[in-house]
Image: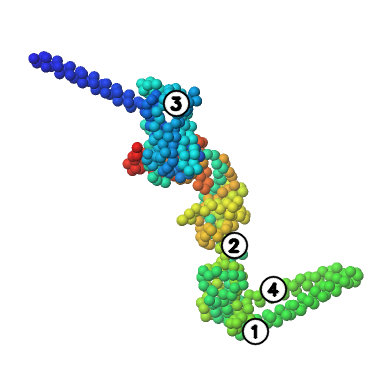
Amino acid sequence: MNKIYIFLLLLLALLSGCSEDKKIIMQEQEKSLEPIVITDYSEQTELFVEFDPFVLNQASTFLAHFTHMDTFKAFKKGSVEACLTFTNNKKECFIVSSPAFEGIFKPVAIPTQSGEAELSMSVSLNDIVVTHHLGSFTVYETKDKVPLLEEEDGAKISYLKEQQWKVDYATEIVKSKTLRESISTFAKVEIPSNHEYLMSAPVSGIVTLNEKAYIGNKVQKNMSLAYITPLLAQKEDVSTLKFELKKASINLNLKKNEYKRLQKLKAQNAVSQKRLSIAQQEQNIAKAQLANIKQRLNRFDTNSNKESGISLKSLIDGQVSKISALDGSYVNEGDQIAHILNPTKLLLNVNIPQSDIYKVNKPLGLELITSERTLDFSVEKNAKFLYFSDVLDAKTKGASLYFEVDNTIANLKAGASYSVKAYTGKKVNSLAIPKSAIVNDNGRYVVYVQIGGESFERRNIKTGLRDGNYVEVLSGVSEGEHIVSTGAYQVLLSAVSPAAAGSGHAH
């Protein structure tokens, strides 16, 4: 009895083992029948689609993920048509009029003939009508004729479409670009001489400020900002100056008449050329004396309504940046009254280190970095190259590169210093990617290459020149590859911890 019992137990265990082996084999076969996965791009759309191999009269469901290439967001509406075109020109199409989930369309193909067929998928939404041609596929007569597929490389990083659509995400194709060589340095903002006016007291006296004389106020050329009540002796000096103006005017007329008289005599050879030249010089001196006195009188207005007041006027259009005298205070001749600036044009004095002077060839502009933004000044657009002085500054030990820039939008502050990248004039044509695509991962520059709709590779890269928002890539990527240009850090998180990036399929 015991022997029979033991035999039955052994037989049951053997049958059970065979059943488990068969189950394992079936599971392995099921695992091997992986869906076909394709990613295809057009200018307007990206298609990432998964579907089962085609079998005669059996359903193959497409999971077609459609993405707008301008926004990298999912299609929320639209219709999708999947078509099989056989070698005998018979065409079978399968249509859905709306997505099953946001961005995901699920047409079901049930082919009615076997053989080779070209597969295409089209999406239509308003003005968007795009067809993706996905290649040739076999429709098998039976499921057991479908060949087993090799397992995919497990080293790929998975970042699902449902994750991409929910965050700021974009890709860009690696292309060759013309990049400008630059020198990282600093620049000091200076005011051009014709955009700055230091108003000073022409005489000693009491200052009366105009109601328009306050910091920040915009002023126009010849606008009065202050009056000075001079001392008595100084008022007599003003009168003397007017008298001198009359004398200079009379003297100039005399010199003109004398020069004309001598010209006539010279025509008759009655005087020498030397005598005529002396008369011409005397006339020029008389003109200069008269102009000097007029310029001195134009600085103030003794006919002002202000009692005994000399009007002080701005000589430029600009803005009051500083008031140095108090209303009613006493000032000496030459004391500063106000500082007028016109910051619409500025000079950028770029310091070029001694070790980089040899690089400067034909300066193309600069990139200036503030605490809020980065500004690009180009000689082709909004900057003017003035000159390059290779004489070293005693303090900075660098040469000076000068640009004049339009400050109406930049709003730079005179006297401030900024970090800049000065473009030397050298250009190279090389592969380049956006700065936003590069992630600093433990001291290594890394980018993420999209090798499929939801599959990515981590690549270490070597960088070169930096020009604006683009960086030269010397190694690590190839032309034509799609790299993650926005949202690269989210892909990094997905590689480290899928939960941290937010995972999960909607289908």
Relative height, residue 1 to residue 124 (above, below): above
- The picture quadrant where one finds residue 195 is bottom right
For badge 3, the amino acid type reads Phe
Tell me if label 2 and label 4 are in contact, CB under 8 Å: no
Single out the mark in the foreground, 3 or 2.
Answer: 3
Pick whichever of labels 3 and 2 is earlier in the sequence: 3
Q: CA distance from mark 3 to mark 4?
A: 94 Å
Between 204 and 23, the one lying in front of the other is 23
In percent of width and height, residue 385 lies at: 61, 54
Single out the mark in the foreground, 1 or 3.
Answer: 3
Q: Residues within 10 Å of mark 1 (few under 14, many from 20)?
A: few
Q: Which residue is mark 4?
A: 292
In percent of width and height, residue 230 lies at: 59, 82
Pick whichever of labels 3 and 4 is earlier in the sequence: 3
Pick whichever of labels 1 and 4 is earlier in the sequence: 1
Q: Could one spot residue 31 in this view of the protein?
A: yes
Count the numbered circles shown.
Answer: 4
Q: Which residue is mark 3?
A: 137
Residue 236 is marked as: 1
Q: CA distance from mark 1 to mark 2?
A: 37 Å
Q: Residues within 10 Å of mark 3 (few under 14, many from 20)?
A: some
In percent of width and height, residue 123 lies at: 46, 38
Single out the mark in the foreground, 1 or 2.
Answer: 2
In percent of width and height, residue 365 lies at: 57, 51
Q: Which residue is mark 2?
A: 192
For badge 4, the amino acid type reads Asn
Q: Give the residue at x 42% y 32%.
A: 94
Q: Quadrant of the N terminus?
A: top left
Specify whether 346 is left or right of 267.
left
Tell me if label 1 and label 4 are in contact, CB under 8 Å: no
Secondary structure at numbered mark 3: strand
Q: CA distance from mark 1 to mark 4?
A: 19 Å
